[in-house]
Image: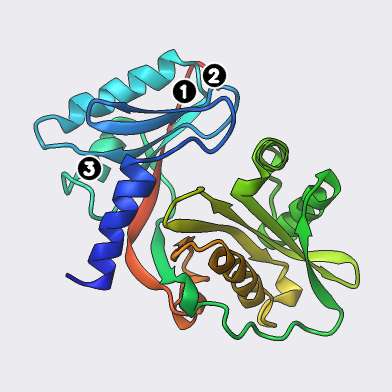
Amino acid sequence: MTFETDVRDLYDAEERRGAVTDRPGAVVERAGAVVRQCAPDGGWNAVVWSDLREDTADAEIAAQVAYFAGAGVPRFEWKLYGHDRPADLGERLGAAGFVAEPAETLMVARTAEVGAEPPALPDGVRIEEVTDAAGVDLMMEAHRLAFDEDHPGLREQLLGRLEAAPQTLMALVALADGRPVSAARMEIRPGGSFAGLWGGGTAPAWRGKGIYRALVAHRAAEAARRGIPYLQVDASPDSRPILHRLGFHALTTTTPYIWTNPTTT
């Protein structure tokens, strides 16, 4: 066995088969051969794990479409990993009306190996932890600059987490002379082996200056303080080489397949 195989198996067991809800009001349940989250109040609806065979896959896909359509959700995601079976599951999802979004790479690092020597920040840049609505608004502005799009649903999700379960979230914003230029968060499952790094994005004019790496190191230090052994990222092609240099290993790919409810559009 290798690091990649061992840790991928642990990730599947804890974060997929043993998934827990990411927000108040959502439900995570095992339903036959899948684990799914349903959040009909506007949260993330998804199939996060499946154990399908060639002779059962199409019927299971249809059953999940019927379930989420019956719940009235506008869309749901089938989070497909590169090692999921059957091997043609992506094609079967496409035939059932799902649309694939760009693939990312599931990368994991040992927490102790990341962030030991955080890079120096540029002059005038500081990192602040977000604890209230004003800080979340700064994060949203940083995301808008980084990704050229708004994330209204994310704002409400972060506010809800900070209010209901602040121990499960670390949110950060990087400020340059008081203006937001980058933001990121870490999602924490108490007692779990993985801390998830999400949302890292930097305004174009501030890229290549070590801010992204500093945000990774800052979160790694907190994860180490909490005794969490691994960090996990769904890495874009842009961030993958940076994370590789920081000690992250590529375990598999992950592709969001999105089904949109025709009755709610």
- Gap in angstroms between the C-alphas marked 3 and 2: 26 Å
Q: Name the residue under label 1.
A: 261
Q: Between marks 3 and 1, how big is the CA–CA gap?
A: 20 Å
Q: Could you tell whether 155 is left or right of 87 in the image?
A: right
Three-letter amino acid code of the residue under disc 1 = Asn
Q: In which quarter of the image is residue 155?
A: top right
Disc 3 target residue: 89
244 w.r.t. 33: above or below: below
Q: Which residue in the rendered view is the most extreme toward the left?
A: 55
Give the quarter of the image for residue 121.
bottom right
Front tag of 3 and 2: 3
Whether residue 262 is situated above or below residue 7 in the rendered picture: above
Amino acid tagged 2:
Thr
Q: Which is nearer the eye, 216 or 224?
A: 224
Element assignment for label 1: loop
Q: Residue at x 90, y 67 (%)?
A: 178
- Residue at horizontal 63 percent and vertical 82 percent from the top: 118
Q: Residue at x 47, y 20 (%)?
A: 262
The answer to whether 202 appears left or right of 45 in the picture is right
Mark positioned earlier in the residue sequence (3 or 2) = 3
Where's the N terminus, which quadrant?
Answer: bottom left
Res 264 label: 2
Coordinates of residue 43 in the picture (x, y in percent): 57, 31
Label ID, residue 237: none
Confirm or deny contact between disc 2 and disc 1 (CB under 8 A): yes
